[in-house]
Image (cartoon, rainbow, N blue to C red):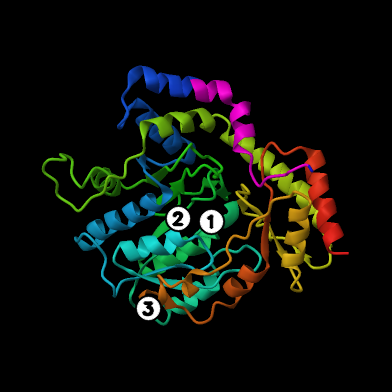
Amino acid sequence: MKQIPMLDLKLEYEYMKEDIDTAIKGCLEHQQWILGPEVKELEDKIAEHIGVKHCVGTSSGTEALILSLRALAMKLKGQEYFEKTNEIITTSFTFTATGDAILRSGATPVFVDINAGTYNMDTTKLREYLKSSDKVVGIIPVHLYGQACNMDEIMKIAKEYNLFVIEDVAQAFGGMWNSKKLGSIGDTGAFSFFPSKNLGGFGDGGMLATNDDKIEELARMIIKHGGKNKYNVEHIGYNARLDTLQAAILLAKFKHANEFNEKRRKIAQFYNEGLKNMNSIALGEALQDATHVYHQYTIRVLDGKREKVQGHLKNEGISTMIYYPVPLHKMEVFGKRAKVANNLTESEKATTEVLSLPMEPLLKEEDLEIIVREIKKALI
């Protein structure tokens, strides 16, 4: 039976093998494994690509979030961490790292509900909570599945309430809101280069993007144990640098990033056309002001039929995933450490309905036809 995976990294490697092999060979030849020349080159290229002054390579997207928060605590409050009384708003329908970074920064996460069509932060709910609390210091909008949040409204609200904004761009490298690249709009942008991402390495990696000179200076200290001189440090730091080898691989893959994002959009168009007007299937909402990069192509399977559809596809060799089966506010780690703004009806509903379909940029049209056909069969 033919197998159709969610992502085929081996196929992608073969597609750009020459560039990647050359990049790895260059590292083997110069042997500068810690903060080698490829790290700065990648930082500079991505900074130019998204339109910011600074990019700081990090060991993961999670660390890019926590570094952003730590640097903002130092800049805004003059202390290493936020306090528990400081609230930072994000959504519950996201990967654990978003909320975990807030806890690690010392602050309290506040979860607001999502918009049913975009899966992103509902700005109406955001405003509602801000009217009831004077403890909020910042917002972390998550550009989930590669879809941009409404950054015009979020930045307007942030300015109105004097809040910082950290964009979680882990799933949206190359995405845009209006004419601006995601990650360039807030105080910082946090990117992930996990292997499955739109721009992914051969292991963990991340990037902090900012136009703020002070945040960049602090972040560069924190990634190297907390100081400009590692033998005489000023801050509580981490060993959170981006590996030279990962930077080299990412530079090679970066050449194909725009091409692969366009391929993802074409696959999404195929799905949209093939699955429109189907009973028990709801498609995501396309925002006019956003450029979606489809880290995931996610549908809703309604009427309690998700398990039936997923089971049928599995039997036919077609991989699917549920991102995410448990909202953050129901995870034990957040328990008494986080707050919930009003109800999270849409977030909870999404966890019971979402289903992500294969989104391999090099998928052939014949494979896409099989996927659409089998979804229809499952719902007969």
Task: Read off the residue under disc 2.
Answer: 167
Q: Residues within 10 Å of mark 2 (few under 14, many from 20)?
A: many
- Considering depth in this image, is 22 or 131 the residue closer to the camera? 22
Q: How crowded is mark 3: few (under 14 residues within 10 Å), some or many (20 or more)?
A: few
- Labels 3 and 1: the sequence-earlier one: 1
Between the residue at mark 3 and the residue at mark 2, the CA separation in whole angstroms equals 25 Å
Q: In this view, does 124 lie above or below 99?
A: below
Amino acid at circle 3: Lys
Tell me if I can see residue 212 in this picture. yes
Element under disc 1:
loop
Element under disc 2:
strand
Q: Give the range drawn in magenta.
A: 2-21
- Residue 143 circle label: 1
- Considering depth in this image, is 349 or 209 the residue closer to the camera? 349
What residue do we see at 50% from left, 82% from top?
A: 342
Labels 3, 1: front one? 3
Task: Read off the residue under disc 3.
Answer: 336
Labels 3, 2: front one? 3
Element under disc 3:
helix
Whether the residues at callouts 2 and 1 have beta carbons within 8 Å, the answer is yes
What residue do we see at 75% from left, 70% from top?
A: 302
Residue 111, position as x, y percentages in the image: 46, 72
* Residue 54, image quadrant: top left
Residue 45, position as x, y percentages in the image: 44, 32
Q: In this view, does 10 lie above or below 164?
A: above
Between the residue at mark 3 and the residue at mark 1, the CA separation in whole angstroms equals 26 Å
Q: Is residue 162 left or right of residue 270?
A: left
**Does the stretch in magenta take in 343?**
no
- Labels 3 and 2: the sequence-earlier one: 2
Q: Is residue 141 left or right of residue 54?
A: right
